[in-house]
């Protein structure tokens, strides 16, 4: 079923090679590359090794019947693909095989690709904005940005690719913008946005709303231990009714949230921090 879904979505990608000289179909190279990356391959040579090691299985599926291409051939074929066309096919494919449920969490976050900086080739680091389905642990879509500051413009483009109806979309403070919140609601989802000083008036109002909670004894403490670090968290939510009139530009603002975090790492001073959130979801 998944192979058929892959074929139906990626067969639309244009192959710019001369058909008479094609030995390895674009579909085959794409599918083998995908399988290799999922299996942990980190370069063209490793993708080739993966394909060679599983060649019998691929041939059973009618893939790579003419043999396994060398790593340079794989790289050359993939590099000729139009990035925007591939991105749309990937997002549509993920949407087709991913089952969404009400309240499902989609986390949108910016990442810098490891080893993407190359001083000799004057190639700067590559920044991506990803949409991650937390329950299924799969990337639903991604958009490349020129640098981290461009995430604000990349997020709306990424959201446009996704079916977020009935989902809860979480974004860090970079994406805490009224336009982004409005887009999420208009696409049928709910937003959960981190609030920091980039929205100073809103941040001050949310901090003030939780002043009493910060002074009360801790309740519902969650403790985690991991690699010499102990972290305790407490979560608080309240209706946003007292802020709705003042911050009406935030569409469907319904809930305020606060996370109190106490972190102790061996050999370091303990840290106490507060993080604040706004959401269109109801309590």
Image (tube, helix red, strand yellow):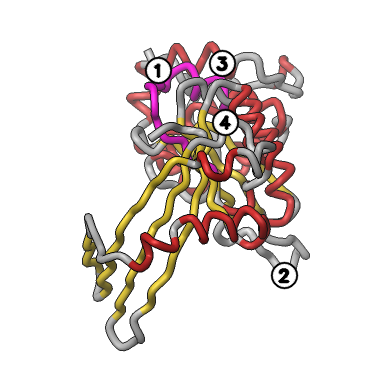
x 44%, y 65%: residue: 274
Residue drawn 66% across the image and 60% down it: 200
Measured Cα–Cα span from mark 1 to mark 2: 40 Å
Q: CA distance from mark 3 to mark 4?
A: 35 Å
Circle nearer the N terminus (1, 2)? 1
Q: Choose between 171 and 77: the one closer to the eye.
A: 171
Which comes before the other along the chain, label 3 or label 4?
A: 3
The tag on residue 119 is 2
Task: Label 2: state its secondary structure.
Answer: loop
Crowding at dot 3, Cα within 10 Å, few <14 / some 14-19 / many 20+, comes out as some
Disc 2 residue crowd, few under 14, some 14–19, many 20+, Cα 10 Å: few
Q: Is residue 264 magenta?
A: no
Q: Quadrant of the C terminus?
A: top left
Marks 2 and 4, how far apart at CA: 47 Å
Label 1, label 4: how many angstroms apart (C-alpha)? 37 Å
In this rendered view, identify the residue nearer to me: 164 or 45. Answer: 164
The residue pinned by badge 4 equals 252
Say the numbered circle drawn on residue 2.
1
Q: Is residue 33 visible?
A: no
* Proximity of marks 1 and 3: CB atoms separated by less than 8 Å: no
Residue located beneath label 3 in the image: 9
Residue 214: percent from left, percent from top: 38, 65
- Judging from the image, what secondary structure is the residue with disc 4 in? loop
Q: Is residue 38 left or right of residue 120?
A: left
């Amino acid at each position: 079923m998944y192979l058929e879904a892959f074929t139906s979505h990626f067969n639309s990608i244009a192959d710019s090679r001369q058909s008479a000289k094609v030995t390895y179909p674009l579909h085959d190279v794409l599918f083998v590359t995908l399988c290799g990356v999922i299996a942990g391959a980190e370069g063209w040579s490793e993708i080739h090794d993966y394909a060679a090691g599983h060649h019998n299985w691929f041939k059973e599926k009618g893939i790579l019947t003419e043999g396994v291409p060398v790593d340079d051939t794989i790289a050359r074929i993939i590099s000729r693909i139009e990035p925007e066309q591939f991105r749309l096919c990937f997002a549509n494919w993920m949407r087709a095989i991913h089952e969404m449920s009400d309240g499902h969490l989609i986390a949108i976050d910016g990442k810098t690709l490891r080893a993407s900086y190359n001083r000799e080739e004057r190639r700067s680091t590559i920044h991506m904005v990803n949409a991650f389905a937390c329950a299924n642990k799969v990337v639903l879509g991604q958009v490349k940005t020129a640098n981290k500051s461009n995430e604000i413009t990349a997020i709306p483009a990424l959201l446009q690719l996704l079916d977020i109806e009935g989902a809860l979309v979480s974004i860090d403070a970079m994406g805490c913008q009224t336009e982004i919140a409005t887009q999420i609601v208009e696409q049928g989802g709910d937003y959960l946005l981190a609030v920091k000083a980039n929205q100073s008036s809103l941040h001050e109002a949310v901090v003030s709303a939780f002043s009493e909670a910060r002074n009360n004894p801790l309740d519902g403490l969650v403790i985690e231990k991991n690699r010499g670090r102990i972290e305790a968290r407490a979560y608080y939510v309240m209706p946003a009714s007292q802020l709705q009139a003042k911050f009406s530009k935030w569409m469907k603002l319904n809930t305020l949230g606060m996370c109190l975090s106490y972190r102790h790492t061996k050999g370091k001073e303990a840290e106490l921090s507060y993080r604040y959130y706004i959401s269109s979801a109801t309590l």
